[in-house]
Amino acid sequence: MYQAPLLQNNQANMMNSNPFANKREKARSPGPVMEYQYETLRPKKQYKEIKKVMRPSKKKFLLMKYGFSFDIKNRCVVCGSQHMWEADDPMRPYIPLTEVDKGRPMKGTFCPKHTQLWRQMEMLEQQILADKHGLDFKRFVPKARLPSLNRPKQPVTTLTPNDVAHLTAAGWSVSPPEMDKENGAERFLRLKAEIIGKMEQLERTLNNGE
Ligand SMILES: [Zn+2]
């Protein structure tokens, strides 16, 4: 007679006894902006943890993973929720890469929640680097801006200097389309961003060489 509730309890207990998967699922699902609470204490393990949260979702068929679930313009590659970023939004995320911090640039984007988690991951990466070099690290997580209602949204057509630096760091070279005339100031910004990206590449190479 009490079997049904017991069974439910067991199922709930089973979910609770595996808090890691549960937590990751929660962090990966659509929702309000949140900070990810790490399971582990060591920064390098934390980095692995949060990188798993940020992996683009893959389609599943008979336990096989293939292709990406949400590699579509204006959709979050992690949770699939729709978000159109304004071109000048300071929180506008980087272009997602197929393997989070490396791989091919994707067509999708990150929603505000996953942008914030991306920043948290980036912050952790900087902390790991700072620790390595014996530098002081100041924890600073920028807050997401509320979308403004009275301004018409404009589609994103240009790469920000951050995008260029991010892509260059991942080993891509960015050049403007043939038809586009780049003016002096734009060229300056792009080259500067490329140098920042190359510096990051150099730093990664040096760190991996240790
Ligand atoms: Zn998302």
Image (cartoon, grey):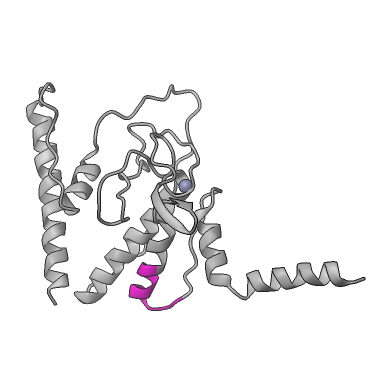
In the image: residue 209, left or right of residue 144: left
Q: Quadrant of the N terminus?
A: bottom right
Image location of residue 85, percent across then percent down: 40, 34
Taking depth in this image into account, of 157 and 108 the one nearest to the observer is 108
Image location of residue 53, percent across then percent down: 44, 60
Please say if 13 is above or below 183: below
In the image: residue 181, left or right of residue 125: left
In the image: residue 10, left or right of residue 120: right
Q: Quadrant of the C terminus?
A: bottom left
Taking depth in this image into account, of 13 and 149 the one nearest to the observer is 13
Taking depth in this image into account, of 172 and 150 the one nearest to the observer is 172
Q: Quadrant of residue 183?
A: top left
Taking depth in this image into account, of 108 and 169 the one nearest to the observer is 108
Image location of residue 81, percent across then percent down: 50, 41
In the image: residue 175, left or right of residue 15: left
Q: Residue at x 71, y 68 (%)?
A: 12
Magenta region, main secondary structure: helix
Q: Residue at x 43, y 21 (%)?
A: 152
Q: Residue at x 41, y 45 (%)?
A: 77
Instruction: Tell me the magenta residue range.
Output: 40-48
Taking the view exactly as shown, the residue that stands out farthest to the front is 62
Looking at the rendered structure, the number of numbered marks drawn on it comes to 0
The answer to whether residue 204 shows anywhere in this view is: yes
Taking the view exactly as shown, the residue that stands out farthest to the left is 184
In the image, residue 133 lies in the stretch drawn in magenta:
no
Please say if 143 is above or below 4: above
The answer to whether residue 142 shows anywhere in this view is: no
Please say if 19 is above or below 35: below
Image location of residue 42, percent across then percent down: 37, 78
Taking the view exactly as shown, the residue that stands out farthest to the right is 1
